[in-house]
Amino acid sequence: MTYTAYENPGTTIKIEQVSSWEASGTYTTAARVTEPNLLYSVRTTLQGGPAYFITASSIIDGEFQFRYDATDDGSVTMTAEQTLVLRSVGEDGEETIEYWRTTSTIGQQRVREISPRDHDNII
């Protein structure tokens, strides 16, 4: 009878992250009150609100700031689309009721070749 040595080294799994990236964006809004109303004085600037009254502020300014960070070189293309949503809502007890809604696209912009070092991409 003959014996032979045998070794099973098992399996080794190695995971290595070679690069990473992250993207984020912030949208800010503001509207100047241009028409007399019961809520705000004319020439008051309203900022960051979730809703504006078009009868008091017919022009709304918006700004989207995009940030892209990566461990390696490279670039991305980013497209921002602005949509105006007009709606009428009310409450029935604890329930919010939407009576009507209209949406329309009011702008779109594409920015190409954004590098990780470009931190102030404003659209």
Image (cartoon, rainbow, N blue to C red):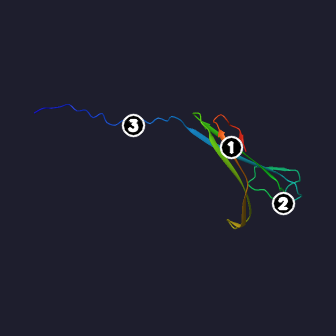
Q: Position of residue 80 (x, y in %)?
A: 68, 49
Q: CA distance from mark 2 to mark 1?
A: 33 Å
Q: Nearer the viewer, mark 2 or mark 1?
A: 1
Q: Secondary structure at mark 2?
A: loop
Q: Which residue is mark 2?
A: 55
Residue density around tag 3, few if under 14, some if 14–19, many if 20 or more, within 10 Å: few
Residue 59 sits in quarter: bottom right
Q: Which residue is mark 3?
A: 13
- Residue placed most toward the observer, 70 or 113: 113
Extreme left residue here?
1
Q: Position of residue 69 (x, y in %)?
A: 62, 37
Which label sits on residue 85? none
Residue 26 lies, with reference to residue 104, above or below; the image says: above
Which label sits on residue 111? 1
Q: Earlier in the sequence, mark 2 or mark 1?
A: 2
Residue 101 lies, with reference to residue 116, above or below; the image says: below
Disc 1 marks which amino acid? Val
Q: Residue at x 84, y 58 (%)?
A: 56
Q: Secondary structure at mark 1?
A: strand
- Residue placed most toward the observer, 76 or 63: 76
Q: Earlier in the sequence, mark 1 or mark 3?
A: 3
Disc 2 marks which amino acid? Thr
Q: Residue at x 84, y 60 (%)?
A: 55
Residue 15 sits in quarter: top left
